[in-house]
Amino acid sequence: MSSFFFKHLRAKSIRAQLTLGLTAALVPCLGIGFYVTHQYTRTRLLEQTQARLQTDSELISYGLNQWGIGVSRLVESLTISPDLRSGNVDKIQAILNGVAVEDSDRLWRFWSASQQPKLLASAGGGGITPAMKLAAERNQPTRAYFQAALRGVPTYEVVLSMTTGRACLNAAHPVYRDSSVPLNRFQEINTAMSRSGLMRQPIRTDLSGVLVLCIPLSQIGEDTGLVTLFRDKKIPLLAGNNRTGFLKDPAGFSSAIILVSNTGQLLFPDAKGAGNTVPMIDELKTSFLPGLYGLAQTVMKGEESFVTLSSTVGEQRYLALTSQVDSAWSLILILNEQSILGEVNKIGGVQALVGLSTLALALLIVAIRSRALSRPLSVAGTALQRISTGDFNLSLPPSTDDEIGGLLHNIQITADRLKSYLSEVTSFAVTQKQIDTAKSIQKDFLLSDLPQSPAYDVAAFSRPALDIGADWYDMVDIGDYAVLLVADVCDKGVPSALYMSVFRSLIRSKLLEHQQDLEASASATDAIRAAIEQTNNYMAANQNASMMFATVFLAAVNKLTGAIDFLCAGHESPVLIRRGEVQLLDRVSGPAIGLFEGASYMSSTLQLERGDTLVIYSDGLVDARDPSNEGWGHERLVDLLSGVKPESSANLLKTVVSVVDEHMAGSDQFDDLTVMVFKWLGA
């Protein structure tokens, strides 16, 4: 079946190939572009929605806080009334009646301050029958908020009112007979203190009574202004209303605000107690948003989040943002995702239509123009076939001044250049072979296997910046001495590498000439100084036309005693690591070799202790540059060596090179890099 399909859809003409090719290219590109644009727009819109919901939650939280402050100030202003302080019941009743006229939904109660309290005055919420009054007086001692007020702590608590049979937010404030007693701020009862801690507090004896404000939870939305907020144009995202039973409506809703206490009480909306119970967040379990109950539990713990909730009815999804109002209350703002993303989907439909129209128009234009392209393309194909066989002697006819004409022109230029390049490549191949040979020869200069001894542990590394380097290291084990050398010829590349081979051969030969001096312990200093001075004099006198020079660190270490004689001819100061402390051996012995004939050099001595480590390096180590052209530097080297405790010289060498490579972060190597690590183990 597949072979039949491809056989009959096989494009033979240029026009068909371009049309099918363009279709194959544009369809996935348009699809990917549409998808990426749609996802980006959706993500950005959700981010902006979260920010706007956060702003709205802050506005609502501020309003609720201000409402709470207003309620507390109203209650406090009544408690400092002389009539309430004196306990004049008739005047108290008149005051409460006056306040109730302003807001008939609020209920006011004035209780006697005793363990068996009496309801002395009340207003709002209709009349209270003797039976209701008796039931309230019997139940009042069990109220935690009332017990807190008897102890001088103004608090609020959601309870089931015995006089109305409805769930209420009760705010209780002690009324002091003495006006000099300072007033405390309102607190949620469970925030103020524990129940056991409350009962351990003594009841105050300076109270004339307790004033209680009861706000029915069914009126919280109106009282706090939450219902009004849904009609406020300042928060268009939450436009709508929290209608009764909206959480169980299969049709869903556009937006909602849910207010819960941190003790699990459902304060808004639909906060209507039934069966002598206070509404709790357990009611959210039966909503068509199963994740809402868990979200309410999370926000009760003070955790703020922005999540997506899925409905069990249909495919509706909702954005939910949680926010704390204060230490006792929290908000859940819910917004139908479709109300935000509906426009995005409409825009996506328009984009898809525009994309398909563009594709159709493009294919039509390609089909029309492809016929004019086929002939010059055939010429171009024939020319390229000749080039592929090595025939660069082309003479293409003149063509039109367009892309196809440019193609033919470029093919002609390519053929001409390939003819020229063929000659150049032949010559270059010879040069490259010579460079490869030079690299192989230079590699032989560096010791692949360093001398080994129970008295020391040594490792070395060298890496050129270009194909051929100008750094080198060397080591000679003669008698009781191990001679170490790290050197660097100025500049880099082939010229420096040529001089490196001369410097290296001269120094090594001079050291071997003084082998007897090295075998005599007293003459080690003379041996290394003579090798450097003789090499310097020869190069300065005979090979200095190009003003090439080399910096050298040369040391002779007595394997038996750890005594070291060394000189530093213009080279980087080695680092000594001793018992975790790092020291630069910055002792100058003389100038770089090869510059001044007759220059003299002074050697220095040092007594190594068992476990001491020398780190000898070229300037390519400290001059290694990162992508911002910042050098690695001596300070980083000292810091690194101060903090490592390598088990061997090879491990320390590997660590140093690895850290430098991390600093370079892929940048081109600035200079040749050479490092030698020598650890004296003792005789």
Image (spheres, rainbow, N blue to C red):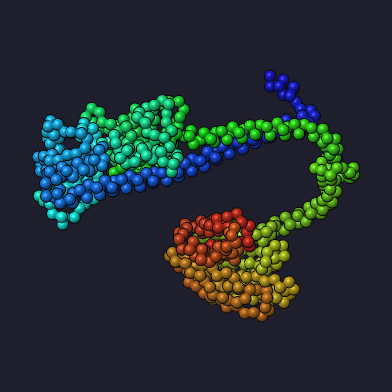
Is 659 on the left-hand or right-hand side of 265? right
* Residue at (87% x, 42% y) in the render: 399
The percent coordinates of residue 303 (x first, y second) are 36, 43
Is 331 on the left-hand or right-hand side of 184? right
The percent coordinates of residue 679 (x first, y second) are 50, 63
Visible residue check, residue 343: yes
* Residue at (65% x, 34% y) in the render: 355
Is 433 on the left-hand or right-hand side of 229? right
The N terminus - image quarter: top right
Residue 482, image quadrant: bottom right
Is 349 on the left-hand or right-hand side of 381? left
Visible residue check, residue 518: no
* Residue at (80% x, 29% y) in the render: 13
In front: 26, or 672?
Answer: 26
In front: 657, or 629?
Answer: 629
Residue 276, image quadrant: top left
Reply above or below: 212 against 524: above
* Residue at (35% x, 46% y) in the render: 63
Reply above or below: 598 against 184: below
In front: 538, or 105?
Answer: 105
The percent coordinates of residue 244 (x first, y second) are 35, 29
Reply above or below: 79 against 101: below
Reply above or below: 666 against 576: above
